[in-house]
Image (cartoon, helix red, strand yellow):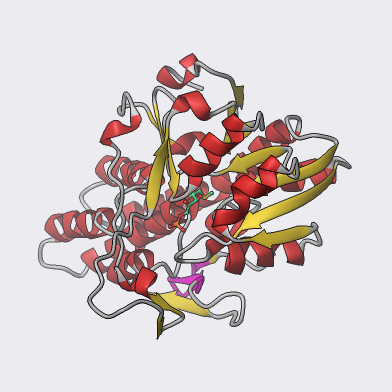
Amino acid sequence: MIATLSYDTTAHELQLLDQRILPSVVEYVTCRTSSDVAQAIATMVVRGAPAIGVTAAYGVLLGAREAMADNDPARAMSRVFDSLAASRPTAVNLFWALERMRQVYLQHSPLRQSTLDALQCEALRIHQQDVEDNRCLGDHGAQLLPDRGTVLTHCNAGALATAGYGTALGVIRSAVAMGKELQVYATETRPFLQGARLTAFELQQDRIPVTLICDNMVGAMMAQGKIQSVVVGADRIAANGDTANKIGTYGIAVLAMAHGVPFYVAAPSSTIDRAMTSGKNIVIEQREPSEVTHFMGYPVAPEGIAVENPSFDLTPAKYISAIITERGVLKPPFAELKSSC
Ligand code: MRU
C-alpha cells in the first residue's frame, strides 16, 4: 500500500496522502506547521481515528519547533495543543496522542533542543506502535472470520485510516494471509465515500476480491444470506463497549443482529475511552451540509434545503459480538474494557 503519512526528520515536514482526491489522484500535502496539520485533519486530507492520532503527534512536534522561536514558548505550546484538539471531536485517538505528547513535553520543559528530541522520539514511537498494534489485532481478529465466505465492512478502517495495515481491513488482510477464502462487500459510505474511494481502492490494490454496494443495500444482501460476518473500525469505544463509528454503522449492526450475522469491532486500545462510562456522552461531529447536498462539487439537492450531517453514530454494546484489540478478542459484557485490556 502507498504510505498514508510520513515524517521527514531532516526537513521537518509531514507528508500526508490527500484522501479527498483518492483514488483518481495520488498526491501528498506537505505540512510544515502545527496549523497546517490541524487544518489537514479538519478538512479530511487525513482521516480515520488512528491516522488522525499519529498526525496530531507530529503536529505537536512541528508546533514545538515553532514555539522555540516564540517570545512565550509555554503559551505558544498551549495554543498548539488547543488548535490540534479542536480539529475533530469524535475520535479519541487524537486526544490520546495529544496527551502522550503533552506528558513528554511536561517532563522535558522548559522547551529546548532536548525537548524537541524527546517529542520526535515519542511521535515516531506512536507512529510505529500503530502499525504493530494493527498487525497484532489483525491476527487476533482473523481467527473469528469464516474459512470462506463474505465479510462486510463499512467506511474505511484500512491502511489509509491508520499508520499502516488497518484495523477492520487488517483483520481481513490477516485472514486472507492465513489462507481464508474471503470476499469483501464494501459499502460506499455516504456522504464522503470512504468505502467507494478508499476501501475499494485498498482492497483492489491488495487483490482481495471486493464488491462495492450502496449503503442502502446491506439489508437486502443480508436477507439473501450473502454476508457471513461484519467487521468495522471504531472512533471511540466507551467503557461499557458502546462504540462510535462512521454514520451508518448502527444500522448495519441492527441488521446483522436481525439476520444472525456476527458483528465485530476492530480497534487498537488507544480507541478505548475508559473515562466514558457509556456511549451517550460521546460528541458526534456534525459536518458541512454541502457534503450531502453536493456530489463531487455538483448540486444534487434543491438550494436552501435543511440538512443533517452527523459524521458518526453510536452502536450500543448489545449489538457487538466481539471487540478486537492488539491484546486479544473481548466478548460481551466487555468487562475488561473497564480495567486494562
Ligand atoms: O470521518 P472519518 O473518515 O475519519 O471516519 C473514519 C471512521 O469512522 C473509521 O471507521 C474509524 O475512524 C476507524 S479507522 C481505523
Residue drawn at x 33%, y 45% is: 95
Quarter of the figure with residue 133? top right
Q: Nearer the viewer, residue 288 or 206?
A: 288
- Residue 77 is situated, as x and y percent measured from the top left of the image, at 20, 57
Residue drawn at x 35%, y 67% is: 37
Residue drawn at x 60%, y 45% is: 219
- Report the quarter where the N terminus lies: bottom right
- Residue 6 is situated, as x and y percent measured from the top left of the image, at 54, 66
- Residue 163 is situated, as x and y percent measured from the top left of the image, at 56, 55
Residue drawn at x 43%, y 17% is: 339
Highlighted magenta segment, given as a residue range:
6-19
Q: Is residue 1 left or right of residue 313?
A: right
Q: Is residue 288 left or right of residue 158?
A: left
Task: Look at the image and say whether residue 246 sits in the magenta stretch.
Answer: no
- Residue 306 is situated, as x and y percent measured from the top left of the image, at 24, 66
Residue furthest to the bottom = 298
- Confirm whether residue 282 shows in the render: yes
- Confirm whether residue 325 shows in the render: no
